[in-house]
Image (cartoon, grey):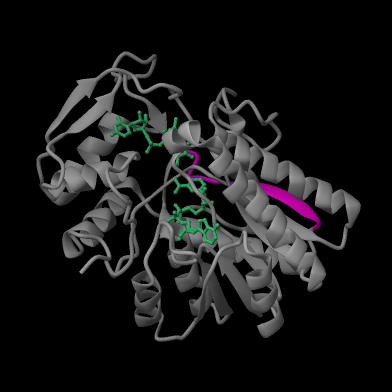
Amino acid sequence: MNILVTGGAGYIGSHTCVELLGEGFEVVVLDNLCNSSEESLERVEKITGKKLKFYKGDILDTEFLDRVFTENKIDGVIHFAGLKAVGESVKLPLMYYQNNVEGTVKLCLAMQKHGVKNIVFSSSATVYGKNEPPLSEKLPTGDCSNPYGRTKYFIEEILKDIYVSDNEWNIVLLRYFNPIGAHESGLIGEDPNGIPNNLMPYISQVAIGKLPKLNIFGNDYDTPDGTCIRDYIHVVDLAKGHIKAIEKVFEGCGIKTYNLGTGKGYSVMDIVNAFEESTGLKLNYEFAPRRAGDLPSVYSDPSLAEKELDWTAKYSIADMCRDTWNWQSKNPKGYKK
Ligand code: NAD
Ligand code: UD1
């Protein structure tokens, strides 16, 4: 089977390429490298000892998409390509709607034209908005607090409409919780541009001395230690979930939605403590005001993916911290030389 991986040079995409190649899939990556480096793909080949095909280009470019689908017999698409910085999406909503929503529409048009009707889409737990955890797939969605989140919600709805119009499509919507960690080789990992917005890359850059201290956004939430609770999931577990999802698609699943999370919630302080414990390092941190838009507690009900995909997350928080630090300490500048 030949899988087109859009955004395959990015953080989750590169880890998924490792799993796909390991499972014997042929991989074609399409990425404009706006938030990644081709180096990640060279490292994917190094880890797996296998080759993949790379096209540098944009999902907004219809002619380019046409060329990729013409030159390759694609059986299914895993669609990661998208912009993901929440704060930036508030400042530049049109860029987010164009890149994520219009980009997905163009991708689906190209798929339709070439008779490819199998897709796995990277959605996010953010579509659940303010629902009370544990968050199950049955809950209503769409009450998102920012344009980035709304692009995920809109794309889910667009894909549902495509299925209604033509039920030859097989579509899996994956709602990720908080992916962290890195491949155990330390060759690939998360390499954010500029100052990280997310907790784990921020912690690891404090640990490596790139940033002076971690600001913990709020310690007065209604949680056991006052800091926010999230469902952190090892990126390799997440990547393995994509193998199960694309297999489900090839079985002819119609349209399905699954959470990819561990079902366990950890607070910001739990993560700081676990990072210190598994690395032996001391983190410089202080409490800071709450960050706008943060919810006190977000974690999944992962039982549907367990039941229907035969998938559960295996790695612990200690594993996630160890592997993050292994990647960061071996690559202090990320993919930059
Ligand atoms: P990432 O930025 O590392 O990867 C996204 C990739 O898409 C990048 O390599 C980027 O260059 C590429 N890209 C962006 N726009 C493109 C375009 N128009 N054409 C071609 N390539 C384009 O991000 P990630 O963390 O690997 O996330 C992958 C997907 O998962 C995204 O859609 C993201 O919204 C979603 N997601 C991520 C998280 C998370 O916490 N990392 C959580 C939920 C959902
Ligand atoms: C954020 C986004 C979410 C997006 C996800 C992945 C918001 C409100 N939510 O999720 O839409 O899908 O990233 O890109 O931005 N924290 C600190 N200090 C920091 C960074 C984070 O204390 O320097 C805290 C946050 O307040 C939060 C927790 O750590 O409580 C996790 O934050 P983060 O990694 O940004 O993930 P989310 O907020 O869950």
> Which residue is rendered at x = 33% and y = 51% of the image?
192
> Which residue is rendered at x = 54% and y = 26% of the image?
145
Which one is nearer the viewer's eye here, 275 or 12?
12
Which one is nearer the viewer's eye here, 30 or 236?
30
Which one is nearer the viewer's eye here, 46 or 281?
46
> Which residue is rendered at x = 53% and y = 53% of the image?
312
Where residue 154 sits in the image (x, y, percent)? Answer: 69, 40
Please give left or right for residue 163 compared with residue 108 in the image.
right
Q: Is residue 307 visible?
A: no
The quadrant of the picture occupied by the N terminus is bottom right
Please give the range of residues in magenta. 254-265
Please give left or right for residue 322 compared with residue 73 in the image.
left
The quadrant of the picture occupied by the C terminus is bottom left
Rendered image quadrant of residue 4: bottom right
Which one is nearer the viewer's eye here, 308 or 170?
170
- On whether residue 260 falls in the magenta region, the answer is yes
Image quadrant of ligand 2 equals top left
Rendered image quadrant of residue 81: bottom right
Where residue 128 sits in the image (x, y, percent)? Answer: 60, 31
Q: Image height check: is 174 above or below 169?
A: above
Rendered image quadrant of residue 253: bottom right
> Which residue is rendered at x = 66% and y = 70% of the image?
65
Where residue 188 sits in the image (x, y, percent)? Answer: 33, 66
Q: Image height check: is 307 above or below 57?
A: above
Q: How many marks?
A: 0
Where residue 223 sits in the image (x, y, percent)? Answer: 37, 19
Q: Image height check: is 122 above or below 292?
A: below
